[in-house]
Image: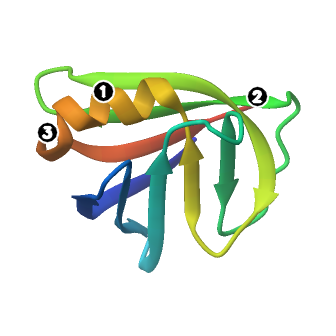
Amino acid sequence: MISFKITKLDIFQSYFFGEVEFRSDKFKVNIQNQRRGKVLKLPFEIEPKNEKVVVRLTGDNDLFVEDYLPYKGESEWVEIDSDEITYFLADHQDQLDIIEISYE
């Protein structure tokens, strides 16, 4: 499992943009609806055995949202395109602080 700590996440018209930390590295994060389809891109390569991986955002008091997203390769940023995650985040923006990526 890969875990990113959300250090900043701001809402814009139809998406969220901010910053996450992985180990000691900082990366930009963009979370938006799936108008181009469900997508997960990461700032480094992973090699999942399955096409889809579990993307979960968690917070205090067992609060979480997750979706199964196809891994689409490398990007400069963490990119998450998911209606389910975006709409949940709109209602719980300041309550989620971790992004977890689980895969086999």
Instruction: Give the mark nearer the N terminus: 1 vs 3.
Output: 1
Residue hosting label 1: 88
**Residue 48: percent from the left, percent from the top?**
82, 39
> Is 89 situated left or right of 78 in this image?
left
Measuring 85% from the left and 48% from the top, which residue is drawn there?
47
> Tag 1: residue type?
Phe
**Residue 84: percent from the left, percent from the top?**
45, 23
> Tag 3: residue type?
Gln
Residue 39, quarter of picture: top right
**Residue 102: percent from the left, percent from the top?**
60, 34
Q: Nearer the viewer, mark 1 or mark 2?
A: 1
Density class for disc 3 (Cα within 10 Å; few <14, some 14-19, many ≥20) is some
Residue hosting label 3: 95
Residue 49, quarter of picture: top right
Measuring 26% from the left and 60% from the top, which residue is drawn there?
9
Q: CA distance from mark 3 to mark 2?
A: 26 Å
The residue nearer to you, when weighing 40 against 44, is 40
Residue hosting label 2: 52
Q: CA distance from mark 1 to mark 3?
A: 11 Å
Q: Nearer the viewer, mark 1 or mark 3?
A: 1
Instruction: Give the mark nearer the N terminus: 1 vs 2.
Output: 2
